[in-house]
Image: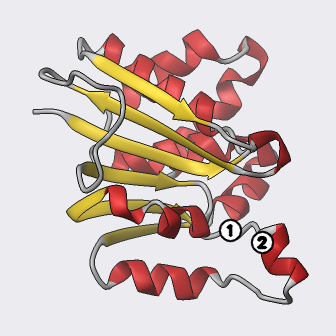
Amino acid sequence: MAKNILICGVGGQGTVLAAKVLSQAAISGGENVLSAETIGMAQRGGSVVSHVRIGDNVYSPLIPKGQADIIIAFEAAEAVRNIEYLKKNGTVIINTKVVQPSTASLEGKVFEADTMIEFLKKDYKVVAVDAEKICEELGSSKIVNMVLLGAASTAGIIDREELKAAIKLLVKPAFYELNVRAVEYCK
């Protein structure tokens, strides 16, 4: 049976690397994988969405709307923005951090993580992760992606040991231990 995983965030958060690590972990586990990214204005803080499809009988890298088993959201508003991809009874692993869009800031609006998480909890299983706090404890703001992949492994989406092996292949050796600690943080 296929697993459909949508990873979303804004430019610079490490969503593309997370998708590559997740894909490599599945490949190392003997699974077939198709993936694709839609990046848009990522360099300017715009939306980044990665589709990762794992398993047999998958013929397109793009997840059809309503078919994602899980959304891994690096930012709360991106979870809400992409919720139409999640199937009923799906899971959202969500970073509680909100990146205020410049358009909202110009209009004096404020996006609240709690409001968005409560909205999502009405229809979906939500695992809220304060990745910013975890990153602070581990000493680097650049490992949000691995913290969220660790949370996904806790939810049973991917094997943690396969994730660590994929990190070893894809991350510079100097950053391997830090990234592994981030994956292992969520138990």
Please identify the quadrant where the N terminus is shown: top left
140 relative to 18 in the view: left or right:
right
13 and 83: which is toward the camera: 83
Q: Secondary structure at mark 1?
A: loop
Q: Quadrant of residue 90?
A: bottom left
Q: Amino acid at mark 2?
A: Gln
Which colour style is shown? secondary structure
Task: Tell me where residue 60 appears, x and y as whole percent.
Answer: 29, 25
**The disc label shown at residue 100, or none:** 2
135 relative to 163 in the view: left or right:
right
Task: Tell me where residue 179 appears, x and y as whole percent.
Answer: 64, 32
Q: Residue at x 38, y 32 (%)?
A: 52
Image height check: is 23 above or below 139? above
62 and 87: which is toward the camera: 62
Q: Residue at x 68, y 41 (%)?
A: 40
Task: Tell me where residue 129 appears, x and y as whole percent.
Answer: 54, 64
Q: Residue at x 72, y 61 (%)?
A: 132
Image height check: is 80 above or below 181? below
Residue wearing tag 1: 97
43 and 54: which is toward the camera: 43
